[in-house]
């Protein structure tokens, strides 16, 4: 009887220890939406007006795979520097997890940025764009879709350039980027 009890305790202990305590990006978005230092936006793909743009069949297929964009923006101020550093470290830890693979790093006029992918070589479930600037703040964008093709990602950007998206509703985000 003691052996059965020991085996059960070991199985329960192994199960508990194998559970991951790492925060997912989705959990981070939810938790951060409560933080007053963050601005949070959820944008449907229809807001980009891609259906009105003149697109090739490939671009239409790529655009139809896009579902929505989740945006978190943190405007750095003198009184929230410690929280900024904490949030920046938390995001980098999540993005270094095994779920994401880095597509590219960039230096932009806003600051340093990376594009990360979640999915396999044939289909992308999520594209994450992260950028930070120690003077202005940080931005985190999740592009969510169904079976997005990595090769079509560039075509999606081209399609967005052809759309007549005018940025209505994103004035606060624009002000953050301007500083």
Image (cartoon, grey):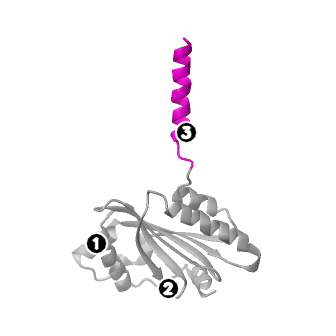
Name the residue that disc number 3 marks.
Answer: 17
Q: For residue 148, which quarter of the picture?
A: bottom left
Residues 175 and 5: in front is 5
Mark 3 crowdedness (10 Å alpha carbons): few <14, some 14-19, many ≥20: few
Badge number at residue 151: 1
Question: x, y (%) of residue 142?
Answer: 47, 67
Query: Which residue shows up at 59% across the image and 75% down it?
Result: 138
Query: Which residue shows up at 24% across the image and 79% down it?
Result: 56
Question: Is label 1 in contact with label 3 (beta carbons under 8 Å)?
Answer: no
Tell me if residue 37 can be seen: no
Q: Which residues are magenta?
A: 1-21
Name the residue that disc number 2 marks.
Answer: 108
Viewport quadrant of the N terminus: top right
Q: Which is more N-terminal, label 2 or label 1? A: 2
> Which secondary structure class fits the magenta region best?
helix
Query: Which residue shows up at 56% across the image and 65% down it?
Result: 91
Badge number at residue 21: none
Does residue 176 appear left or right of residue 49 in this picture? right
């Amino acid at each position: 009887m003691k052996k059965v009890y020991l085996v059960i305790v070991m199985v329960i202990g192994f199960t508990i220890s194998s559970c991951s305590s790492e925060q997912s990006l989705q959990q981070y978005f939810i938790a951060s939406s409560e933080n007053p230092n963050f601005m949070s936006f959820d944008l449907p793909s229809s807001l980009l007006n891609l259906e009105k743009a003149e697109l090739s069949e490939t671009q239409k297929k790529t655009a139809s795979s896009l579902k929505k964009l989740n945006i978190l923006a943190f405007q750095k101020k003198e009184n929230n520097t410690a929280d900024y550093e904490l949030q920046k470290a938390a995001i980098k830890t999540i993005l270094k997890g095994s779920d994401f693979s880095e597509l590219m790093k960039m230096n932009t006029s806003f600051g340093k940025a990376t594009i990360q992918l979640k999915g396999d070589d044939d289909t992308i479930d999520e594209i994450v764009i992260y950028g930070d600037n120690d003077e202005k703040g940080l931005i985190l964008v999740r592009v969510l879709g169904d079976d997005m093709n990595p090769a079509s990602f560039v075509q999606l950007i081209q399609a967005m350039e052809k759309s007549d998206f005018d940025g209505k509703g994103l004035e606060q985000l624009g002000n953050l980027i301007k500083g």
